[in-house]
Amino acid sequence: AQSVTQLDSHVSVSEGTPVLLRCNYSSSYSPSLFWYVQHPNKGLQLLLKYTSAATLVKGINGFEAEFKKSETSFHLTKPSAHMSDAAEYFCVVSEGTSYDKVIFGPGTSLSVIP
Amino acid sequence: NAGVTQTPKFQVLKTGQSMTLQCAQDMNHNSMYWYRQDPGMGLRLIYYSASEGTTDKGEVPNGYNVSRLNKREFSLRLESAAPSQTSVYFCASSWTGSNSPLHFGNGTRLTVT
């Protein structure tokens, strides 16, 4: 069965420093992987998506993620945090074609300190 | 371009009351979904509609019903609300295929007392 683990429930960084949000997954197949961001009182917005093309995926707002099959990881990074990056981030795994096989991680809350 | 629109934004119900959450999308997507979000649990799928005319249960369907009214609209009904249904509800839509990105509405915050 597939699953998603987000290793940190909360991450705090200073503005201008790098961001690392960690995600590990398990899947019986070659999954698609996503990162979504949720700002307060808003819906989720797609940051980036991996679907077996390039292992380094670039997303919106300067975020990127690297798919490492050997480590079953899909960590999200950004070189320099901005105040507007403060939000909840969700790692999502999807396998096969069944819509009920889209699994959300529990989320990581990112705080950015001025 | 509105995307996915959910109504209402907030609702308070007493135990046993019923209500319907409305969702509409203007992106011509085939598939629509209802999720609930609870602290520390990510999003859990309640029901989904892979295409117009079909609906299927997700991970947590008990206590809910859905209607895919047409291609644009997908409603979620609570027949007899319970405190355990206090949550934030999100509607989403996508193109066909579970590998297609989801587009979310801004959510409905429901409190059941």
Image (cartoon, coloured by chain):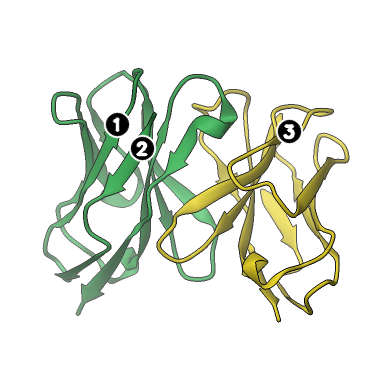
Q: Tag 1, which chain?
A: A
Secondary structure of residue under mark 2? strand
- Which mark, by number, is residue B28? 3
Q: Tag 2, which chain?
A: A
- Residue beneath the point at 50% across and 31% down: A101
Q: Which chain is green?
A: A
Among the 4 quarters of the image, the one containing residue B90 = bottom right
- Residue A93 in percent (x, y) is at 39, 35
Are dots 3 and 1 in contact, CB under 8 Å? no
Q: Quadrant of the C terminus of chain B?
A: bottom right
Q: From the image, tell me which residue sits under label 1.
A: A26
- Residue beneath the point at 32% across and 68% down: A86
Are dots 2 and 3 in contact, CB under 8 Å? no
- Residue A46 in percent (x, y) is at 45, 45
Marks 3 and 1, Cα distance to the nearest angstrom?
32 Å
Q: Tag 3, which chain?
A: B
Mark 2 / mark 1, whichever is N-terminal? 2
Q: From the image, tell me which residue sits under label 2.
A: A3
Marks 2 and 3, Cα distance to the nearest angstrom?
30 Å
Foreground: A54 or B83?
B83
Task: Give the crowd class for mark 1: few <14, some 14-19, many >=20 residues within 10 Å.
Answer: some
